[in-house]
Image: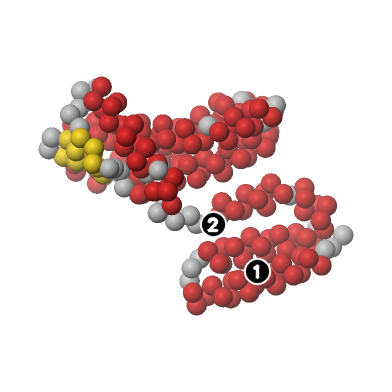
């Protein structure tokens, strides 16, 4: 069942990898790797078996590094800042927002590109696609994918409010400790946990056997 298209794709993948050596873009090399995987599958497994591997091959797209600057175009930073302000005011903080910088008496908190929640969104889409593939009925599949962005935004807002609370108690030095990256990791847990609840136990059992 070997397909001649597979050999062609492998050749294209090698060209992309070689071109990326002097350019060092990482993107051409990653794209070449994905094209090479598809080419090898077509060459050694054939079209029919390759179609059965469509999902894992498609998930390889998430291996391509995404520029953090893209998070600005998704408006996660701004949405997080805008949504955090009324909640912080509700719990008693005096806060003024200047774009994505939250100004408090005595300190400020900048929702930077690295803290935009884009990483959690990206990982959430990966896990959401996997869960959706095993979810039933079809409306639940669409619901799982539709909930990725709201969950990522909600998790990042919760992180910002938590960091503001601990900063007000212990000072800005707390942001230089392991608590800061740990709070980022917690957003992944919240997003993935929310998606599992939406997908249901049946989908989770199908994913992990």
* Residue 168: percent from left, percent from top: 18, 33
* Residue 116: percent from left, percent from top: 37, 44
Residue 113, relative to residue 135: is it above or below? below
Which residue occupies 24% across, 22% down? 91
The residue pinned by badge 2 equals: 64
Residue 103, relative to residue 26: is it above or below? above
Quick check: can you spot residue 162?
no
* Residue 119: percent from left, percent from top: 44, 46
Q: How is the image coloured?
A: secondary structure
Locate the N terminus and report the quarter of the image it occupies: bottom right
Q: Earlier in the sequence, mark 2 or mark 1?
A: 1
Side of 112 where 27 appears, left or right:
right
Side of 177 where 33 appears, left or right:
right
Side of 124 where 73 appears, left or right:
left
Which residue occupies 67% across, 70% down? 12
The residue pinned by badge 1 equals: 13
Residue 39, relative to residue 113: is it above or below? below
- Crowd around label 1: few <14 · some 14–19 · many ≥20 (10 Å): many
* Residue 122: percent from left, percent from top: 50, 45
Locate the C terminus and report the quarter of the image it occupies: top right
> Residue at the bottom extreme?
22
* Distance between the alpha carbons at the discs numbered 2 and 1: 14 Å
- Crowd around label 2: few <14 · some 14–19 · many ≥20 (10 Å): some
Q: Secondary structure at mark 1?
A: helix
Which residue occupies 78% across, 60% down? 42
Q: Secondary structure at mark 2?
A: loop
Which residue occupies 56% across, 30% down? 196
> Quadrant of the rendered structure where residue 11 is?
bottom right
Quick check: can you spot residue 82?
yes
> Residue at the left extreme?
106
Side of 136 where 30 appears, left or right:
left
Count of marks placed on residues = 2
């Amino acid at each position: 069942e070997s397909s001649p298209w597979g050999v062609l794709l492998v050749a294209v993948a090698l060209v992309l990898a070689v071109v990326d050596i002097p350019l060092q873009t990482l993107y051409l090399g990653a794209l070449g790797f994905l094209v090479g995987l598809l080419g090898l599958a077509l060459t050694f497994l054939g079209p029919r078996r390759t179609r059965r591997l469509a999902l894992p091959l498609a998930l390889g797209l998430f291996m391509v590094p995404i520029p953090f600057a893209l998070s600005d175009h998704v408006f996660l930073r701004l949405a997080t800042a805008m949504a955090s302000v009324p909640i912080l005011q509700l719990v008693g903080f005096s806060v003024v927002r200047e774009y994505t910088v939250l100004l408090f008496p005595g300190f400020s908190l900048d929702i930077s590109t690295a803290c935009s929640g884009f990483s959690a969104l990206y990982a959430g889409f990966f896990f959401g696609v996997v869960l959706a593939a095993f979810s039933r009925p079809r409306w639940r599949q669409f619901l799982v994918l539709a909930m990725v962005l709201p969950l990522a935004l909600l998790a990042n807002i919760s992180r910002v409010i938590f960091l503001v609370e601990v900063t007000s108690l212990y000072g800005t030095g707390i942001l230089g400790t392991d608590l800061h990256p740990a709070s980022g990791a917690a957003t992944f847990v919240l997003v993935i946990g929310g998606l599992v609840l939406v997908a249901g136990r049946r989908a989770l059992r199908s994913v992990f056997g």
